Image (spheres, helix red, strand yellow):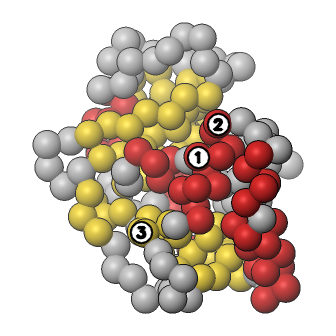
Amino acid sequence: MKKQKLHQIGTTADGVPVFEKKINHASTHNHSRNITSEAISKITLNEDEEWQTHVVEFDRNIGYSNCVKVSEQDEIVYAVRKYRDHPSRMVKGYTPQPCNSLIVILKKSPNTKGVILVTAFVGEKDSALNTPWGGHLKKGTDEYKASVNFWKNHALIFEGEDIKRVLNDEEAQELNKTYFENTEELER
């Protein structure tokens, strides 16, 4: 796979340059690059953490969050979105809600004196939780338990243009069974 060039998108409040790849998760989200750059300028990094999640609040609405609370009556599907390897839990029939915060996820760059923008999206703090099936969380940890509890009651709004593949019924049922029906999973 060809290595992508990085270009600087902004600088953090503590003077660290932030770079992004041309193709990244943030490029699929519906908010302006100006908002992302403004949010980056408000962030102070924690030097000890390789991966960092920052919730940057604004004094105005900056866009629309597509993460919503769901119920058992909702039509839930699992789909793999563009530029991602793992499925997202999604719901049909909802409208994005106005929001005043941007989630910014950064990773230390091994090749520069800065950090790389992994993704940025409009949303509330808890919507930044990794999904339990994404492979990033260790079972039994507090972060894993919080993720299962959050995603059991929330989903992203299904928007067809962002979708690579919808999981079939069997695959979706397996995810539900593994993570949301077997509550003893939280104790492991």
CA distance separating discs 1 and 3: 16 Å
Location of residue 180 in the rendering, given as x and y in whole percent from the top left corner: 70, 67
Question: Which comes sooner in the sequence, label 1 or label 3?
Answer: 3
Q: Amino acid at mark 2?
A: Asp
Q: Residues within 10 Å of mark 3 (few under 14, many from 20)?
A: many
Q: Which residue is mark 1?
A: 146
Q: Secondary structure at mark 2?
A: helix
Name the residue: 38% across, 38% down: 55
Q: Which residue is mark 2?
A: 142
1 left or right, relative to 71: right
Q: Quadrant of residue 95?
A: bottom left
Q: Amino acid at mark 3?
A: Val
Location of residue 64 in the rendering, given as x and y in whole percent from the top left corner: 31, 64
Location of residue 114 in the rendering, given as x and y in whole percent from the top left corner: 55, 19
Question: Which comes sooner in the sequence, label 2 or label 3?
Answer: 3
Tags 1 and 2 touching, CB below 8 Å: yes
Q: Nearer the viewer, residue 147 or 167?
A: 147
